[in-house]
Image (spheres, rainbow, N blue to C red):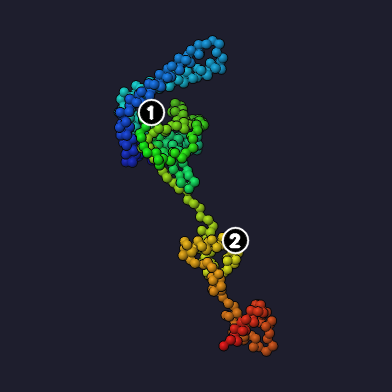
């Protein structure tokens, strides 16, 4: 899908409009955000003065000096960032329009699609982390995929109320109650995946933060449920086949077990399965006893006719018919009955 096609897509337009409206509805909370940023700026300013004072010590070890210098530079960069955000908060509607820019949102969606179709696993991991809060599984084979609606506009998270300002919602059914304590993940090597180095750093920092979505209301998430299909056992798969074979051959349990290369308990369980699930009753001894063909009865007349030959004996008849002498005798007895 091209950028123009995505921008013209009604589902995409509805998504952008819903997010924009929701962010605009948060305007009364802008003062809370401003207050938090100003408080953070003040703390950083105090800490920065401490860094400068320490750096002014001529006896400071060079290794420690470099570490303090890096800390000071990081804090100053964050202070500059806060100043920019405070300046931007003067017009909430303008900020929302800038963040929820359909052109920008479309570009990020396409970037995600392009990355997922590539071969850079690290880049895939980082971009998916912008969208996925977590994947939760239970012992029953249920899987819950929890995704953020702000995956392509994570900058908007700065505008949302968190912690004590977060929306009060019923968490009794929230899957996050079951999750383990999150841990900070390893930063990914993005190499030359993104042309904008600042963007790459920002995405990476966000991806490795286990609390990146903490405090957001449930209205900013979607939960998609999956279920791992339970693989049927051998007896469940072959139950109908086993039952039909036993009925057709009037076989004993032992014969059926030998035929399918399984144990008698497994065959018995399969036959019960066939009875319950497929309505085929092939259980019990009567299957092999009542339905088994009686050779002596069916061939009684043939045996009697053979024995009527001059000099014919039971032993000769047994050899002729390939049966035991008791079977031949039984057939002869049946034939002699009126």
Residue 217 shows which numbered tag?
none
Give the quarter of the figure containing the C terminus: bottom right
Q: Position of residue 204 (x, y in %)?
A: 47, 30
Question: In this orientation, which residue lies closer to the viewer: 130 or 166?
Answer: 166
Question: In this orientation, which residue lies closer to the viewer: 2 or 177?
Answer: 177
Q: Is residue 293 above or below residue 309?
A: above
Question: In this orientation, which residue lies closer to the viewer: 327 or 301?
Answer: 327
- Residue 59 appears in the picture as rendered: yes
Q: Position of residue 129 (x, y in %)?
A: 45, 35
Q: Is residue 106 above or below residue 327?
A: above
Give the quarter of the figure containing the N terminus: top left
Check whether the beta carbons of the residues at disc 1 and disc 2 lie within 8 A of each other.
Answer: no
Q: Position of residue 273 (x, y in %)?
A: 50, 61
Q: Which residue is pictured at 30% across the width and 32% down the height?
A: 25
Number of other residues with Cα within 10 Å of mark 1, as a class: few under 14, some 14 to 19, many 20 or more? few
Q: Which residue is pictured at 59% across the width and 78% down the height?
A: 295
Q: Quadrant of residue 298?
A: bottom right
Q: Which residue is pictured at 54% across the width and 61% down the height?
A: 269
Describe residue 298's horizontal placement relative to residue 147 as left or right.
Answer: right
Pointer 2: what residue?
263
Q: Quadrant of residue 20?
A: top left
Q: Position of residue 92 (x, y in %)?
A: 31, 27
Pointer 1: what residue?
158
């Amino acid at each position: 899908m091209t950028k123009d096609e995505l921008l013209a897509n009604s589902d995409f337009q509805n998504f952008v409009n819903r997010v924009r409206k929701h962010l605009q509805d948060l305007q009364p909370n802008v003062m809370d955000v401003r207050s938090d940023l100003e408080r953070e700026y003040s703390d950083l300013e105090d800490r920065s003065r401490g860094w400068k004072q320490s750096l002014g010590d001529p006896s400071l070890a060079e290794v420690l000096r470099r570490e303090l210098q890096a800390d000071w530079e990081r804090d100053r960069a964050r202070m500059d960032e806060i100043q920019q955000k405070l300046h931007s908060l003067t017009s909430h509607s303008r900020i929302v329009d800038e963040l929820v820019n359909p052109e920008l949102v479309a570009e990020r969606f396409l970037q995600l699609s392009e990355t997922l179709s590539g071969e850079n696993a690290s880049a895939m991991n980082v971009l998916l982390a912008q969208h996925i809060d977590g994947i939760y599984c239970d012992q029953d084979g249920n899987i819950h995929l929890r995704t953020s609606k702000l995956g392509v506009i994570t900058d908007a998270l700065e505008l949302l109320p968190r912690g004590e300002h977060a929306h009060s919602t019923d968490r009794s059914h929230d899957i996050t109650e079951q999750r383990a304590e999150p841990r900070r993940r390893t930063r990914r090597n993005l190499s030359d995946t993104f042309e904008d180095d600042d963007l790459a750093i920002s995405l990476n920092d966000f991806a490795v933060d286990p609390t990146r979505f903490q405090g957001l209301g449930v209205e900013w998430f979607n939960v998609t449920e999956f279920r791992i299909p339970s693989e049927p056992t051998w007896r469940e798969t072959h139950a109908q086949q086993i039952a039909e074979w036993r009925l057709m051959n009037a076989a004993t349990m032992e014969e059926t077990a030998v035929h399918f290369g399984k144990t008698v308990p497994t065959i018995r369980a399969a036959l019960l399965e066939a009875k319950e699930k497929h309505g085929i009753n092939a259980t019990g001894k009567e299957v092999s006893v009542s339905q088994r063909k009686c050779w002596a009865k069916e061939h009684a007349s043939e045996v009697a006719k053979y024995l009527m030959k001059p000099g014919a004996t039971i032993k000769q008849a047994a050899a002729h018919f390939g049966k035991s002498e008791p079977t031949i005798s039984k057939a002869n007895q049946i034939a002699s009955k009126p």
